[in-house]
Image (spheres, rainbow, N blue to C red):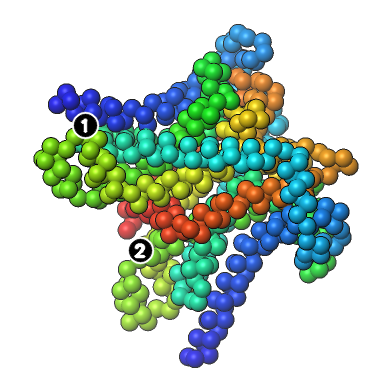
Amino acid sequence: MRRTAILICLLLLPAVATRLFTAIYPFFNTVWLSFHDWNPAFPPQQFVGLKNFQALTRDIAVTSSISFTVLFVTVSTLLEIVLGMAIALMLNRAFFGRGAVRAVNLIPWAIPMVVAAIGFRWMYDTQYGVINDLLHRTIGVKVPWLVDFWGARAAVIATNVWKSTPFVGLVLLAALQGVPQDLYEAGRVDGTNRVSAFFYITLPLIMPQIVTIGLFMVVWQLAAFDLVFAMTGGGPGFATQLLAYRIYQVAFTALNFGYASAISMVLFIVVGIASIIGLLLFRKVEVSL
Amino acid sequence: MRLARAVDSALLAIAVFIFLFIVLFPFYWIVLSSFTPKYELFTIPPRYWFSTFTLENYQALANSIPLVRYFVNSLLFAAGSSLVSVAAAFLASYALARIQFHGANLIFIAFVISIALPQIGGLVPLFELFKSTNLINTYHGLVILMSSLVLPFTIWILVPFLRQIPYEIEEAAIMDGARLPQLFWFITLPIMRPALVTMFIINFIIAWNELIYPLVFATSGSNKTLSVGLVELAVQPTAGGGRPWDLLSAMSVVMIVPILVLVLLFQRLIVSGLTRGAIK
């Protein structure tokens, strides 16, 4: 009995120790720091209570980054689910070269986000960019993508959707492959067409997986950083400042550790709310089956 | 009926074509730019085909940054992190999947929930911790950080995998007097090989693409990765306020090629690993 206990501890030690050291402790320390004033150049830390939180409600850079983050995550996730579903349905059909197309579908997930961000930044260039050239040739307009407030926001979200949708499609494809074929057979006997089969058979059956991947994408994209860091630098102005980017700026450019921790708390709370909503949705979906 | 089928196939073909165009065009554009002379990149309208094929962008890149050094750093960082994460996850998964003890499920759930902790939220305390323990700018410090980041996901995949393998073989070996190291080496590791290789490849790709940790914790040239080198090039304004697209496109190609090789070689494994977590 004793020996088993020691063995369990030894086996778990490397994994638990690294997580405690690099994730759990920093999380609690950030909570602690958010109630303090601390610039590493001018120690010591000073307890200031809720001062950081009061400051961030009045800080236009933070409030706009919160609203853009919510917008970015909501729009991205909805588009990824809808377009990912389309990709999954397409790749679930039998056609010549399907294996190769499925391999292509993996590529956007696999490449670095920084490469996608920089590549699209080049393509979105107002003067020399290929996207404006294609638009100019087809509908005769040029959009000042990355210098315009909403243009930059649209470009950032589009790039994110381009990068992440194929992964969602991959997961939903696996979900589709798990739907028993005889259900469709039974449906055909009852005279359902393809559209109603999708809405009455496929969709209810894979709803748990849709909610799961949706929740995963929401939580994951709330902490998105690489994209705006490499593509827009948060600009123009504060247009594309995501929360994670704002935290990085306040912490490592302004060296305002306490304030950065308070903004991190906002991020934690948003992630927490999103997770709870996701779990409630999931239970509802599970029960309805 | 026949007409309906023909329309259906045509629509499917069009959908596949649009999909391939949207996914592949940016790659075509980056590769094209990387082989186009600098002075021809800035033309209106842009050129859609190789007008002059050149390797000078790659030469200029190698001359302006320590490219080989960054490449080797990325490789060592990704390989080290994926090796350490898979090893630690294997040991933990064995305890969680094979030994019946009170709280095993709780520990497993704690690992899974910790996936949701945003990386950026712990950066300040981590930075201070690494400063006081002299881990900043060390290879092992970076590997600890990165392997920790992918550990929960790896455990999430490995535990169910191990649970679905019958315990009889291992039981028989223990009856025959095998000790734990022998058991792992001769029985458990071979049984789990597909899952371990899969997670090694996935974690390698994730670490190769990682920006935040190297950006904050690899501040000296000797440890910088390709991802850090790339964003440094991107945020440095050049003369005339433009961006060095010649160098950026070449460096993007250098970063993408190893990933493409992995995807083409291990497509099936990667897909199985990525979907196993989501499909339960």
Mark 1, residue position: B102
Say if residue B174 shows up in the picture: yes
Let me know if marks 1 and 2 both belong to one chain. Answer: no
Q: Amino acid at mark 2?
A: Gly
- The chain identifier of the residue carrying mark 2 reads A
Q: Residue at x 71, y 31 (%)?
A: A60
User: Residue B223's spot in the image, x, y percent?
Assistant: 60, 31
Q: Residue at x 53, y 37 (%)?
A: B77
Q: For mark 2, does the 10 Å Cα neighbourhood hold few (<14), some (14 to 19), or many (20 or more) residues? A: few
Viewer-proximal residue among B146 and B187:
B187
Mark 2, residue position: A178
User: Residue B88's spot in the image, x, y percent?
Assistant: 37, 35
Snapshot quadrant of residue A92: bottom left
Under tag 2, what secondary structure?
loop
- Residue furthest out toward the left: B175
Q: Is residue B280 left or right of residue B11?
A: left
Q: Amino acid at mark 1?
A: His
Q: Residue at x 60, y 67 (%)?
A: B20
Say if residue A69 shows up in the picture: no
User: Residue A102's spot in the image, x, y percent?
Assistant: 50, 65
Q: Name the quadrant of the N terminus of chain A.
A: top left
Marks 1 and 2, how far apart at CA = 33 Å
Q: For mark 1, does the 10 Å Cα neighbourhood hold few (<14), some (14 to 19), or many (20 or more) residues? A: few
